[in-house]
């Protein structure tokens, strides 16, 4: 079987996670990487045995041996490498959010269509077992009509400095916005966002958003970046769905696996990208396997489409606008 060859753009912590997943996939190779920080790219390439460190984005995208480009840059830098990759006839996987500007999302979709190539956005929760099982229960009609959803996705305050480059709604709540759109299959009528800044950071450290769907379903998203690191919690993620004939609950905290040691309490990730023997598993592995299968078979992704990912950006941007302006924002269905 001919291997799927992927070039990595972005050698930060998420780039590392992707490489940890790729090296556990049969029939997948990463022959080249690029990062604006050349030293970081060289260090990661050496660690993972990647033969080529490209001097520019253009050099990587032009490599004839590549089938696809994996864009794992900061959130504000997704569009440029995606557009370059399509111009060179490559398929693209890009981490969420698809872009920070809905206009960039549209450009990316148009470029994929013009090139006749795959554009898949990394909404990882569509590949996480618990969230997928909830989707299957909803789709099968087991729970009835969805009435209400509430999601929380809270983080330690020590992560504020690293992730304040992006508003927490676009960094974190967009996961749950996408889930709500996926579960309901509905468009959004109106949103209202609320935010607070308790620690004086660039963006808010407390965010709540209320989403009114077209068929009167209500969704609430919460992301608060004030958890104490010393508590060893790590992630505080949950999803509560109420329907006319049942309720679905997803909880990732407290974790199913915990360690109690002399240095404190620890709950390692067992869902998103757990690392075992140097290889990332979980939802990240499933997501990248799916992308590589789509590339190998030249098949457009169905589990997450580019227009769906773009609409999640539109809704989340409206929530941020609402929180900033203090007003409700109506969306066109």
Image (spheres, grey):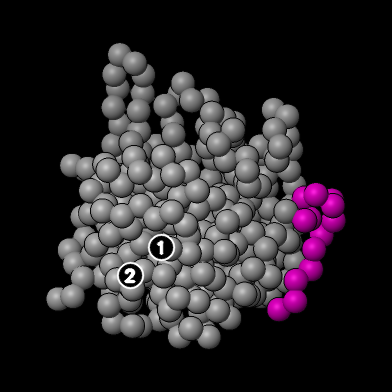
User: Could you tell which of marks 2 and 1 lies nearer the N-terminus?
Assistant: 1
| Helix, strand or loop for disc 1 | helix
Question: Is residue 332 visible in the rendered structure shown here?
Answer: yes
At 62% across and 64% down in the image, what residue appears? 313
Image location of residue 27, percent across then percent down: 19, 67
Depicted 279 relative to depicted 292: above or below = above
Q: Quadrant of the N terminus?
A: bottom left
Horizontal side of residue 39 vs 310, given as left or right: left
Disc sitting over residue 66 in the figure: 2
Q: Nearer the viewer, residue 24 or 71?
A: 71
Vertically, is 136 above or below 176?
below
Image location (x, y in percent) of residue 109 = 56, 77
Q: CA distance from mark 2 to mark 1?
A: 9 Å
Q: Residue at x 53, y 45 (%)?
A: 153
Residue 312, position as x, y percentages in the image: 60, 66
Residue 285 lies, in percent from the top left, at 29, 57
Q: Is residue 323 left or right of residue 102?
A: right
Quarter-of-image position of residue 215: bottom right
* Residue at image mark 1: 60
Q: Residue at x 75, y 71 (%)?
A: 331
Q: Is residue 40 above or below residue 150?
A: above
Are the two marked residues, 2 and 1, in contact with CB atoms closer than 8 angstroms?
Answer: yes
Residue positioned most to the top = 262
Task: Residue lying at the far left in this picture: please name it.
Answer: 1
- Which residue is at 39% across, 55% downward? 54
Q: Secondary structure at mark 2?
A: loop
Please tell me the numbered disc located at residue 172: none
Neighbor class of circle 2 (other Cα within 10 Å; few <14, some 14-19, many 20+) is many
Which region of the structure is painted magenta? 321-333
């Amino acid at each position: 079987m001919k291997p799927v060859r992927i070039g990595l753009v972005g050698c930060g912590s998420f780039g590392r996670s992707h490489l940890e997943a790729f090296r556990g996939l049969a029939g997948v190779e990463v022959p080249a990487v690029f990062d604006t920080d050349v030293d970081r790219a060289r260090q990661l390439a050496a660690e993972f045995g990647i033969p080529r460190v490209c001097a520019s984005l253009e050099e990587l995208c032009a490599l004839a041996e590549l089938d696809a480009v994996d864009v794992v840059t900061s959130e504000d830098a997704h569009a440029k490498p995606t557009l370059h990759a399509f111009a060179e006839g490559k398929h693209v996987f890009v981490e969420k959010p698809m872009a920070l500007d809905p206009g960039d999302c549209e450009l990316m979709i148009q470029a994929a269509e013009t090139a006749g190539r795959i554009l898949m956005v990394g909404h990882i929760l569509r590949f996480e077992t618990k969230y997928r099982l909830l989707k299957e229960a909803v789709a099968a009609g087991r729970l009835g009509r969805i009435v209400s959803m509430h999601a929380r996705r809270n983080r330690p305050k020590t992560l504020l400095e690293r992730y304040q480059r992006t508003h927490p709604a676009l960094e974190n709540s967009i996961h749950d916005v996408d889930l709500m759109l996926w579960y309901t299959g509905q468009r959004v009528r109106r949103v209202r966002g609320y935010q607070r800044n308790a620690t004086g950071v660039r963006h808010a450290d407390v965010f709540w958003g209320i989403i009114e769907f077209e068929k009167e379903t209500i969704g609430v998203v919460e992301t608060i970046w004030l958890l104490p690191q010393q508590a060893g919690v790590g992630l505080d993620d949950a999803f509560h769905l109420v329907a006319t004939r049942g309720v679905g609950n997803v909880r990732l905290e407290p974790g199913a696996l915990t360690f109690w040691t002399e240095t404190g309490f620890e709950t390692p990730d067992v869902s998103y990208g757990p690392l075992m023997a140097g290889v990332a598993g979980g939802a990240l592995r499933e997501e990248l396997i799916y992308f590589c299968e789509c590339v190998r078979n030249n098949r457009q992704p169905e589990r997450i489409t580019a227009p769906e990912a773009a609409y999640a950006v539109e809704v989340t941007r409206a929530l941020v606008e609402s929180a900033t302006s203090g007003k409700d924002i109506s969306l066109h269905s």
